[in-house]
Image (cartoon, helix red, strand yellow):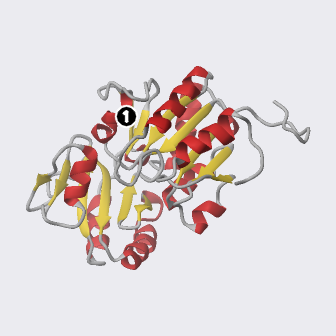
């Protein structure tokens, strides 16, 4: 494909999208235009998948409206699973002994802790910050436990939760330093710090799907809004930041679209993927 200025442009054969803050609105609604944009990708022969910090069941509501056929990357890539939500393509758990250290580091910052295993979501305080919101988002309830002991052998993700965004940001840096090469730690929301296996991050998602579908990374476009999405921006040929993303995230992307309240996902697909790539928005 050739652009208007005569330069060769690598065609996009795959789009990988973040979910919250990107594909859906602030109220977690998949708009008609967003769904139609994905169906237009299918019609154009362009593959599509989603990646999210959500557990697999938390993305179930997207499968039928978007006619998803490729594996979904849950837990930021901790679990790669087919749309039947039972066929696991790959899964990466936190290494033995690491969950205990991560939990301690998060608690040292005064944040609540959630633990996601391959089958469940465990919390210690049902009235903790964002629990009800998360339950509404992922469409299933957590299991309340007094202790996480006995649950840490198959941990897909640990989340540090708090409404002091500066504290969450500081916790991110300290957990990254404490965990080193044994973890991947990045904020999926200003109030969520996601900690996963070191290879379970959105950059790893791009590499895994590229290998699985035999599509070069330069022919993959990614779209997202949060710091953990920058990891997939760095691995893909084209990256699109949402208008609701921070200035730092926007600066990391090839293009910037409108916000998720202004049909930013659909606009991005229409402008930068389906009709060729022009100037940065």
The number of numbered badges drawn on the structure is 1
Q: Is residue 176 above or below residue 195?
A: below
Residue 114 at x, y = what percent? 24, 59
Q: Residue at x 37, y 73 (%)?
A: 168
Residue 41 at x, y = what percent? 58, 28
In the image, farthest residue toward the left: 146
Q: Quadrant of residue 139?
A: top left
Q: Quadrant of residue 15?
A: top right
Quarter holding the C terminus is bottom right
Q: Residue at x 34, y 38 (%)?
A: 59
Secondary structure at numbered mark 1:
helix
In the image, farthest residue toward the right: 6
Relative to the observer, which residue lies in front, 256 or 189? 256
Q: Residue at x 31, y 78 (%)?
A: 109
Structural crowding at the residue carrying mark 1, measured as other residues with C-alpha within 10 Å and reported as few (<14), some (14–19) or many (≥20): some
Give the side of residue 253 with respect to residue 121, left or right: right
Query: In this orientation, does residue 217 appear?
Result: no
Relative to the observer, which residue lies in front, 222 or 179? 222
Query: In this orientation, does residue 32 appear?
Result: yes
Q: Is residue 143 above or below residue 273?
A: below
Q: Is residue 193 above or below residue 258?
A: below
Quarter holding the N terminus is top right
Give the side of residue 185 with respect to residue 223, left or right: left
Q: Residue at x 52, y 55 (%)?
A: 259
Relative to the observer, which residue lies in front, 36 or 109? 36
Residue 133 at x, y = what percent? 24, 56
Q: Which residue is mark 1?
A: 62
Give the side of residue 230 with respect to residue 110, left or right: right
């Amino acid at each position: 494909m050739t652009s208007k200025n005569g330069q060769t442009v690598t065609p996009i054969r795959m789009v990988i999208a973040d979910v919250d803050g990107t594909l859906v609105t602030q109220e977690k609604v998949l708009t008609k235009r967003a769904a139609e944009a994905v169906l237009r990708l299918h019609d154009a022969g362009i593959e599509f998948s989603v990646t999210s910090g959500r557990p697999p069941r938390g993305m179930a509501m997207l499968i039928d409206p978007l006619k998803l056929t490729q594996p979904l990357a849950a837990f930021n890539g901790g679990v790669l699973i087919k749309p039947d939500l039972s066929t696991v393509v790959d899964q990466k758990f936190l290494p033995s002994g690491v969950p205990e250290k991560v939990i301690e580091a998060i608690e040292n910052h005064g944040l609540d802790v959630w633990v996601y295993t391959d089958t469940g979501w465990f919390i210690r305080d049902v009235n903790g910050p964002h629990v009800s919101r998360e339950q509404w988002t992922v469409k299933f309830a957590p299991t309340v436990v007094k202790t996480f002991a006995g649950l840490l052998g198959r941990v897909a993700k640990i989340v540090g939760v708090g409404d002091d965004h500066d504290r969450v940001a500081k916790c991110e840096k300290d957990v990254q330093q404490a965990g080193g090469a044994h973890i991947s730690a990045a904020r999926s929301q200003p109030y969520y710090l996601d900690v996963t296996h070191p290879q379970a991050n959105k950059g790893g998602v791009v590499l895994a799907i590229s290998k699985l579908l035999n599509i070069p990374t330069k022919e993959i476009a990614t779209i997202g809004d949060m710091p953990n999405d920058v990891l997939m921006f760095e691995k893909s040929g084209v990256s699109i930041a949402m208008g609701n993303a921070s200035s730092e995230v926007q600066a990391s992307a090839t293009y910037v679209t409108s916000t998720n309240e202004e049909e930013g996902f659909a606009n991005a697909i229409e402008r930068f993927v389906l009709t060729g790539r022009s100037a940065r928005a």
